[in-house]
Amino acid sequence: MNQRSKQLTLTTLLLITVVISTGCIQETPINDQLTEAIEWEKPQPPSVNATKMEMLVHNLINEERTKEGLERLQWNQEIAAVAREHSEYLANIEQNHGFTQEIYISHTGKDGKQHDHRIEKNEVYYINGSGENVAGISAVEKYYPNNNTPSAYINKTQIAQRAVTGWMNSPGHRKNILTETFEETGIGIATDPTGTNYILTQVFINRANCGYRYGECCENRGCFVGLTCMEETCLPRED
């Protein structure tokens, strides 16, 4: 069998509210001598352990902030739930809406809303704005040249590293990561039905220190909309 080669262009998709950035990494040519035995034992994409991957990305992000002399972001489980919900939506949008591209990323949710609406819907209170970064990473590293099926994958650590590197190389994403006023974050990761494309969403906030649900009332006995101050605690009006 004559040797054939194929050059894979690995596309990393990154998105912030305004800026869309794509990058291509040129891989070395592939020269694989294929046999039925090799094709029969096809490699498998990395299994999903979203929580560990999310914390890996979280630690990598904090390393970037530390390099710039900034405080580390605190993990916020409520924000992570918001991020996971959006990643899961994007990971399955192709089969839901007929998109043909392998990785689809957007800040717009299924209800047409942006991340700030998703945060408020989950009753997370913050001040001085919020931010969101989204990335789409293919786990496929190489393909068999004869049938275009995956022959090698990158691992979960490499997926996390590529997402963070891509964000840091994009001015808008980098700004979110290195915004000094952001204090808390949450990250959500999901895979598409093929298990080969990873969607990563990170949300940033500065958590309000008063006025939020079940928190202390502010000095003027103020609370966020929908809450009322009772015995120095902000409670839902129906309580």
Image (cartoon, rainbow, N blue to C red):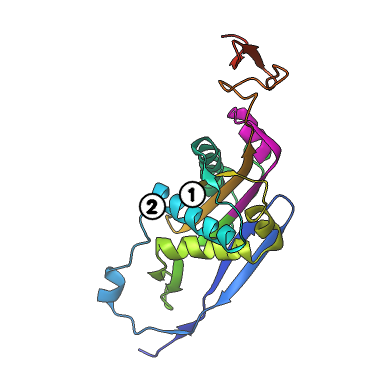
Q: Nearer the viewer, residue 79 or 71?
A: 71
Q: Is 90 rendered above or below residue 40?
A: above
Q: Residues within 10 Å of mark 2 (few under 14, many from 20)?
A: some
Given residues 157 and 147, the one toward you in this image is 157
Which numbered disc, 2 or 1, marks the residue that appears first in the sequence? 2
Q: Is residue 86 above or below residue 170?
A: above
Q: Residue at x 53, y 44 (%)?
A: 74
Quadrant where the C terminus is found in the figure: top right
Would residue 121 be counted in the magenta stretch? yes
Residue at left offset 51%, top offset 41%: 80
Mark 1: give few (<14), some (14-19) or many (20+) Cα within 10 Å. Answer: many
Q: Which quadrant would the N terminus be assigned to in this image?
A: bottom left
Q: Position of residue 9 (x, y in %)?
A: 55, 74
From the viewer's perspective, is 39 left or right of 212? left
User: Is residue 193 in view from this perspective?
Assistant: no
The residue that mark 1 highlights is 189
Residue 210 among those drawn in magenta: no
Residue 129 image position (x, y, % from top left): 71, 40
Q: As rendered, which of 87 and 194 lies closer to the eye?
A: 87
List x then y, in percent, for residue 137: 52, 61
Which residue is disc 2 drawn over? 48
Secondary-structure class at tag 2: loop
* Secondary structure of residue under mark 1: strand
Query: Measured from the top left, where is residue 220 in percent x and y?
Result: 73, 18
The residue lying at 56 percent from left, 57 percent from top is 136
Asked whether the beta carbons under mark 2 and mark 1 sit within 8 Å of each other, the answer is yes
> Image quarter for residue 79?
top right
Find the magenta span and give its range. Answer: 115-134
Residue kind at label 2, given as amino acid type: Val
* Extreme-front residue of the structure: 219
**Left or right placement of residue 33 versus residue 239 in this view:** left
